[in-house]
Amino acid sequence: MPAFSSEERQLLNDSLRDLLADKYTFEHFKKLARAEDGEGFGREDWATYAEMGWLGVALPESAGGAGGGATELGIVMAGAGRFLVLEPLLGTIVLGAGLIEKAGTQDQQKLLGDIAEGKLTLAFCHYEPDSGYARGYVRAIARRDGDGYVIDGAKAHTIAAHAVDTLVISARLGSDKGPVALFLVPRTSAGIKLSPAPALDGRRGAAITLSGVRVPASAKLGDDDKDQLATIGEVLDRGAIAVCAEAVGAMAAVTQITVDYLKTRKQFGQLLSQFQVLQHRLVDMSVTTEEARALVHAALQAIDDGDPHARQAVWKAKVKTAQCARFVGGQAIQLHGGMGMTDELIVGHYYKRLALCETLLGDGEWYLKQLAAEVA
């Protein structure tokens, strides 16, 4: 039985839509994104999400969460996509929390309560400069040093890594042939160099260089030297479907925005919305969004049901959603004309968010190759 009933899921969706529609306006988005002295997201907004219970929606009840599953996370991420939320939801409540819950000791899992309360933000720094999307490519090394570890290596640009409280770092134990472990490393630790830069959609983040970063033994997730690659793969799959849900939310929003825009613009004395060829394109955008939504919903349900084929369902959804995101985003820009390319219209920001969702945690081509390899 699901942790949330259909009615409870609808209430969660409604709470996201109602609050964000009121508070997370385009003006608010621009203020956060453009603030030179800010982090690129809102700490007050984050506190509100905690108060609403969104940050703990999929965390165990023992940690102060609601005990939901992947579907509930998908609802939150779809809301984030619909309103272009800038806060680090993916890195904190999906990836970071997922790794702590699956790999952490009982003491470490107490951190989940801090996540639910909005006291801890996370970024999962796994991919490396030369790794592409390969999940098993880890060259960072953590060597034993007394009663702790010393970590050296580099991680590729990760959204929000410049500002979160703690970085979850993957590194091989002892040598480049050792098992992959996970470490909770405070962002301000000595030896960490951050190279901040915006992502394609303007969300801020940083590439990370670790030079002699010392952490205590308690920083390593788990109490043994088990290779964590399988856990990492499972959590990245959850992250991938969460990104797909975010894209579906953004596609639905930008489709409605485009419909509303064509109802206000005239050509040859007629509203653009009255031209049949443009009506057909709007229908194509809507149908494409619903195709992606159906696959994403099926994959989320497969995860929650413990379906042995859930991984393949996620990969298929990522392939299709990447295609749909490109189509819907491109149509929205075209139907807005030249204005769609400006930062003063919100449609361009949706296009960039969809473009990033298309490639985040692996693009469609990469997941298609994984599916092909499974049947080869």
Image (cartoon, rainbow, N blue to C red):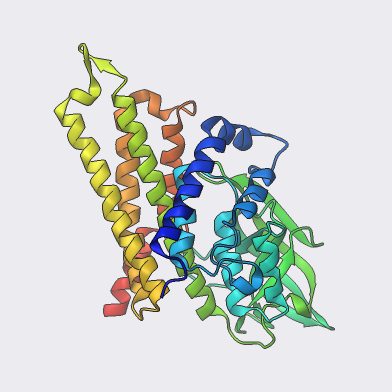
Given residues 77 and 364, the one toward you in this image is 77
**Residue 164 in view:** yes
Q: Which residue is most to the top?
A: 269
Residue at 45 percent across and 56 percent down: it is 75
Residue at 36 percent across and 74 percent down: it is 310
Q: Position of residue 65 (x, y in %)?
A: 60, 66
Report the side of 146 relative to 227 (left or right): right
User: For the N terminus, which image quadrant?
Assistant: bottom left
Q: Position of residue 255 (x, y in %)?
A: 33, 38
Given residues 26 and 333, the one toward you in this image is 26
Give the quadrant of residue 96.
bottom right
User: For the C terminus, which image quadrant?
Assistant: bottom left
Q: Position of residue 371 (x, y in %)?
A: 31, 72
Give the quadrant of residue 318.
bottom left
Q: Which residue is most to the front?
A: 7
Q: Position of residue 224 (x, y in %)?
A: 67, 88
**Residue 160 in view:** no
Count of marks placed on residues: 0
Give the quadrant of residue 169.
bottom right
Given residues 42 and 51, the one toward you in this image is 51
Residue at 30 percent across and 31 percent down: it is 259
Report the side of 91 relative to 69 (left or right): right
Q: Which residue is most to the right?
A: 146
Residue at 54 percent across and 63 percent down: it is 130
Given residues 289 and 360, the one toward you in this image is 289
Would you place residue 338 above or below residue 1 in this image? above
